[in-house]
Image (cartoon, rainbow, N blue to C red):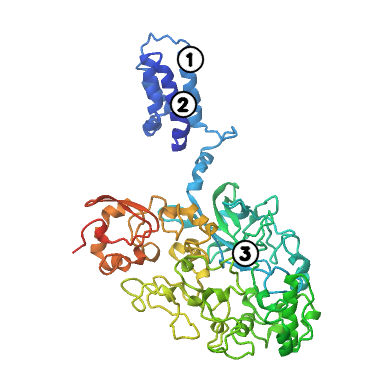
Amino acid sequence: MTPFLHSQIYRPLATLIIIIDLASQNKYHQDTLSWIINFPLAAPAANSRGYGASWRIHMNQRPDTIVLPWLNIFFISALTCLTVLLIYPFTAKGEAISPNQADSLRKPERFQVLAFNDLGMHCYDRDFSVFSLLPPFNVIHAQVLRKGRNPRLLSDNRVELFYSAVEDVGGSINSTSVAKSNFWDHSFDLFGITLAEDQGILGAMMPGLDNTLQPLDEFNPDFRWFTAAGIPITAIDDSGLNNEYPMMRITAKNKLSGETLAETDIVLPVSAEMNCSECHADGGIAADDQAALRNGVAEWSDQSNFEIQYRENILILHDARHSTALMATTPVLCAACHYSPALDLGGTGPQGDQIGHSLLSFAIHGRHGRTIDNTSPDNDTPAIIPEDSTTSCYQCHPGSNTKCLRGAMANAGLSCQDCHGGLMAVAGAYADRMPWLDEPKCQSCHTGDAVNNHDGSIRRTVAYEVDDLSATPIIAANKRFAEQDDTLYRNSLGHGGLACSSCHGSTHAIWPSLEPNDNVAAEQIQGHAGTIIECVACHGRQLGLTTKGPHGMHNVNDPRWNANHEEFYERNPQSCQACHGINLEGTVLSRTAAQRRLKTKENGRIFVPQGTMVSCNMCHKMPD
């Protein structure tokens, strides 16, 4: 008998019958009901002889002179019903299901969906009638694993994945982009393609107001992940309110039966908050009388629409400075002349008009990192956008409202420059740098452990040497926390073939995040925010004691480890010192990710608050 039927159907009904029988004070009935209630516990023995044999053994114990009054009929009928439930379980709709199907009722506990957005933030233009930097374009990657002692990542031979809109805790839902952007009015002029409403430039669709499941129709066998690329989501929800962190539900289904195996809710971060208007709207420092005189501009935009006005002023300024005629050919795709890897979906490199022009990132960062007169900034003559921590980046990137940098790095007080360097470093002014590809590395700050690290710091707060203007990322010798060689974090795989982002979250939104919606996936997977650290999330309760977890971790939140870890220390002390410190008094690597209650031999039960650096002497004496 399955545990589900035993706990949910059989035992309660049998208990109800014995309560009725107690009133009868009938010794035989009580014996009968004792057999009924205890039968599931003895099912293996009963199965070996057959259910009927077990019943006959019981019946042979009854007096031959028993008379069956109406109560006996009730008991026999009840027993018959319970036997039917035992052998032929039913669905909620009353349809008989097979034993295999009954087993599938527990399948959601046996599978896990790990999903994430690829960048942690996707930007798009609020208006497309004048020019475009980026279209609405979002990407989901997802992996599905079967839990167990040795979890297995599943391929598209076994499962298929879908995304659909889901409400966040505030009731916001974003299922359609219809009437939320004029992108579809200009998609042909900008990208040469005619799109249906709610369709992205690669064909991916929004779920629509009927919230139709949409497929993650691409499976990459090298990454073992499913992908939906180019989802055209905007930052406006279905109530017309701004929400830069809308949520989608990722659903894994059995490819043959269509049965839902598991689900996880993730954020599709998106923002149109690009604040060029601060300088380029009429009267701003890039669109006032002095700017007109300095650049030979006859007249700035006369548009009353603020968004269109500053965009036209940018093209007017570009035409004046570079002898172009962009205002006569709107809408303009900036990347048509200034190559951007973000829009090079075929990976072909610069083509046509892009050859001979600066890269889009260099053109923007390089110009705004210099002075108005296009000279190098100094203390007396600042850059157009002075280096002022994350505030500088939020002049153009989303933004003071969106707060793109919101993950663990933001929690630690880091700024954009601590990882990327200043505007001129990003522009490649001091060393060659390919935008979107030459990016900071995890190992540049997470340089090792307590035993072996870059410069005496387990965690640095700047990803490059402070006197390096190019902000070239440090390459650590200890690879404990490194990405795969020559691979970005967002494309790297780690423990058991899982994507790094599956366990740590998306770039710029590394768990735990300051944005509550970001944390929902981690909370669903393991019960609390933060890096996926609970072994049961993927292994269930079947994992043996080990120090071969992610980054060399041992079993987390496992009472067996608390009671039986001594031999691991005796065998290899450094494996413990790596995280708990040379003196075993704890480091940032041994902080508890959630509240813990530990049972110890010397100190009894102890409570460990979240964030505590676990040391040996919390539970017992320091080892010799």
Q: Which one is nearer the viewer's eye here, 491 or 459?
A: 459
Which residue sits furthest left?
A: 624
- Disc 2 target residue: 13
Residue at 52% x, 74% y is 416
Residue 386 located left or right of residue 444: right
Residue 53 shows in the view: no
Looking at numbered disc 3 in the image, what kind of residue is underneath it?
Answer: Val
Residues tagged 1 and 2 counted as in contact (Cβ below 8 A): no
Marks 1 and 2, Cα distance to the nearest angstrom? Answer: 16 Å
Image coordinates of residue 174 in percent, x first then y, are: 65, 56
Q: Quadrant of the C terminus?
A: bottom left
- Disc 1 target residue: 73
The quarter of the displayed image where residue 608 is located: bottom left
Looking at numbered disc 2 in the image, what kind of residue is underneath it?
Answer: Leu
Q: Quick one: label 1 or label 2, which is nearer the N terminus? A: 2
Against 357, residue 581 (above or below) is above
Q: Quick one: label 3 or label 1, which is nearer the N terminus? A: 1
Element at label 3? strand
Residue 49 located left or right of residue 232: left
Which numbered dot is residue 324?
A: none
Which numbered dot is residue 270?
A: 3
Residue 446 shows in the view: yes
Residue 558 located left or right of residue 141: left
Image coordinates of residue 38 in percent, x first then y, are: 37, 28
Looking at numbered disc 1 in the image, what kind of residue is underneath it?
Answer: Ile
Marks 3 and 1, Cα distance to the nearest angstrom? Answer: 67 Å
Image coordinates of residue 354 in percent, x first then y, are: 69, 83
Image coordinates of residue 250 in percent, x first then y, are: 58, 55
